[in-house]
Image (cartoon, rainbow, N blue to C red):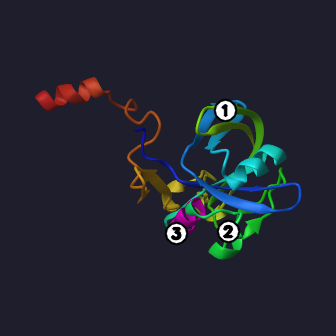
Amino acid sequence: MISPVPAVMVSCGDIDGQKNIITVAWTGTICSEPAMCYISVRKERHSYDMIRESGEFVINLTTVALAKATDWCGVRSGRDFDKFEYCGLTAQRCKTISAPAIEQSPVNIECKVKQIIPLGSHDMFIAEVMGVMVDESLLDPTTGKLDLSRANLLGYAHGEYYALGEKLGTFGWTVKGSTLKSEKRNKRK
């Protein structure tokens, strides 16, 4: 019931050069130093063995423009379709790993598997972030800071996709200049 969650396309490849895309909603950051993340995948999925054997995958953030491809890659098997070709997606060479990224994605997170934890219906692939590629149009030209609010990212909750909304604040914005206590006191006056 923790939602919304990101809807990402995870791209992977095997040692024979096959590539695939799997849509994942169970993903996230687990450590900042070193940068680490996870995905959870069912053993029956075509991508499962590719990721386990290669030890690599790419988390590709998805956008409103990628919503149909995101859904389609989650309900069709790479055993039956070349998902890159069918969805008109371009496999992009990564900088640090062999698995392909999705060129149309605004952010590609290159991951190297460090541990696989069996959990029941899914296994969790814990991975170290080896590199990140970002669409340069999302970088502030003055500061170089990433502005994901312009990416129109997707969220997923209870079987439905959502476009993410407006930015409400930044980390620590509630304590910069005022506190919640002082705001409540001012409302009473």
Specify the segment rendered in magenta: 65-74
Residue 182 falls inside the magenta stretch: no
State the residue lying farthest toward the left: 189
The residue labelled by disc 2 is 83
- The reply to whether residue 109 is visible in this rendering is no
Magenta stretch, main secondary structure, is helix
Taking 141 as reference, is 124 above or below it? Answer: above
**Image spot of residue 36 (x, y percent):** 69, 36
Residue 73 falls inside the magenta stretch: yes
State the residue lying farthest toward the right: 16
- State the separation of the CA atoms marked 2 and 3: 12 Å
Q: Determine crowd level at label 3: few under 14, some 14-19, many 20+ residues with C-alpha closer than 10 A.
A: few
- State the separation of the CA atoms marked 1 and 3: 30 Å
Q: Amino acid at mark 2?
A: Lys
Residue drawn 60% across and 37% down? 29
- The reply to whether residue 48 is visible in this rendering is yes
Between tags 2 and 3, which lies in front? 2
The mark found on residue 118 in the picture is 1
Closer-to-camera residue (25/118): 118
Mark 1 lies on a secondary structure that is strand
Q: Which comes sooner in the sequence, label 1 or label 3?
A: 3
Between tags 1 and 2, which lies in front? 1
Q: Amino acid at mark 3?
A: Lys
